[in-house]
Image: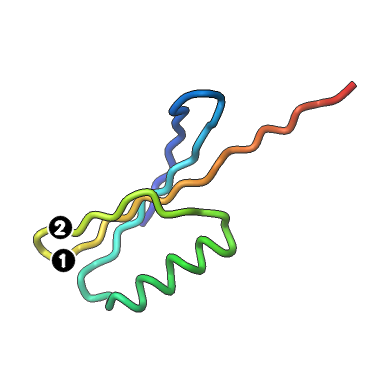
């Protein structure tokens, strides 16, 4: 249902992307609730939503990749 990608758009910020597809049978309030849960518990934010002609929602979520830096 989802796929992770990694991209570095520039200036030292790295993002992790997750693609999620919701079929047309899912009502809008259910999709909203599922996306809010992913945002609250996984740290994801909404990047893009596309609705296809058949009613399918294709959502791209993103979150920053935080690299730990070792201190001496």
Question: Image point 85% across, 25% down: which residue?
Answer: 71
Residue placed most toward the observer, 38 or 12: 12
Is residue 6 left or right of 31 when viewed as pictured? right
Residue 52 against residue 32 in the figure, above or below: above
Residue 37 against residue 5 in the figure, above or below: below
Residue topped by disc 2: 52
Between marks 2 and 1, how big is the CA–CA gap? Answer: 5 Å
**Whole-percent x and y of residue 64?**
55, 41
Q: Secondary structure at mark 2?
A: loop
**Whole-percent x and y of residue 72?**
90, 21
Question: Image point 29% across, 75% down: which residue?
Answer: 28
The answer to which quarter of the image holds residue 1 is bottom left
Q: Secondary structure at mark 1?
A: loop
Question: Image point 51% across, 54% down: which residue?
Answer: 44
Q: Are marks 2 and 1 in contact (CB under 8 Å)?
A: yes
**Whole-percent x and y of residue 35?**
43, 65
Question: Image point 41% across, 54% down: which residue?
Answer: 46
User: Which label was assigned to residue 36?
Assistant: none
Residue topped by disc 1: 55
Q: Given the current orientation, which residue lies at the most extreme left position?
A: 53
Residue 56 against residue 5 in the figure, above or below: below
Q: Residues within 10 Å of mark 1 (few under 14, many from 20)?
A: few
Is residue 29 left or right of 35 when viewed as pictured? left
């Amino acid at each position: 249902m989802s796929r992770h990608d990694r991209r570095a758009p520039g200036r030292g910020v790295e993002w992790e992307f997750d693609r999620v597809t919701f079929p047309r049978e899912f009502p809008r309030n259910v999709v909203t609730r599922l996306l809010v849960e992913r945002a609250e518990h996984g740290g994801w934010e909404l990047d893009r939503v596309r609705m296809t002609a058949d009613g399918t929602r294709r959502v791209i979520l993103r979150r920053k990749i935080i690299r730990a830096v070792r201190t001496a």
